[in-house]
Amino acid sequence: MPIGAQIAVGEIQGRQLKAQMENAADGSLNPDVSIWSGGWLFGYSGVRADLHPYHSAGSRFSNVQVFNRQNQAWMPLDPNVTYTYASYYYDVDPKLVNLTPANHIRVLKDDGGRPLDATEVVVRYLQSLPNRTVTPELNRIRLLDPLPPPLFGNPEIQPLKGLDAANAPLPAGGRPPLQPASSGSAASGLAAGGSTAGGGCVLAAGTRFDPTLLGLLALSVLYLSRRRR
């Protein structure tokens, strides 16, 4: 990977995860393109949520749930609960995991004690799977409103003019466009150390690390293919 990321496991609070999700969404969908920050949402393992793409900053995600691997159940995200979180790590930010302040940080290393590159972590994960094939759960992010068609006929990974309530599609029956939802105490935490770049993986507290990083998958498959030649 060109960014040279490692992978670390740490502990963050639910409000930090929500903040990171909201910041990534705003960095991709804000109608002011000057504040875009990457063009994609984070890919999480063990998280699902509803996405309101036309809502205002801090209120695009709702119904956020985290999968608890101890009781095999989806649980509502609690802003005050501590969760195990794994994502990109850089030596220059020893107290951060993917730019998010975290506690009890542990960098993934090989048997010789050397830090593993993020791509190598995903390669090893793929090698551990039956037939080296990943079967992710689809539709973990449920889009509640359709995105607009491409402006110039070319495929778009994000709307080129961003999104807000003013350009939201009319629901059936011609009712007024959607209005931004109230952020509420559990819905937003943009001041809690969110991030606007890269990918993330989060699990319920006390569970084992699952290093499925969707943003690295294509690179990892290519890397694994080359290693097998």
Image: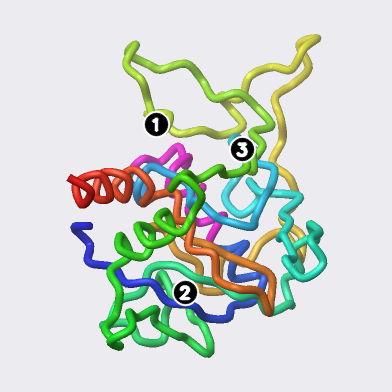
Horizontal and vertical percent position of residue 77: 74, 63
User: Residue at 40% across / 41% down in the picture?
Assistant: 32
Image position of 135 with respect to 200: above or below: above
Residue ID at (38%, 68%): 88
Amino acid marked by disc 1: Ile
Q: What whole-number distance in Å separates the C-alpha atoms at marks 3 and 1?
A: 18 Å
Main SS class of the magenta portion in the image: helix
First along the sequence among labels 1 and 2: 2
Up/down of 175 relative to 72, above or below: above
Disc 2 element: strand
Distance Cα–Cα, label 1 vs label 2: 25 Å
Residue bearing mark 2? 100
Disc marking residue 138: 3
Q: Residues within 10 Å of mark 1 (few under 14, many from 20)?
A: few
Q: How many marks?
A: 3
- Identify the mark nearer the N-term, 3 or 1: 3
The percent coordinates of residue 29 (x first, y second) are 47, 39
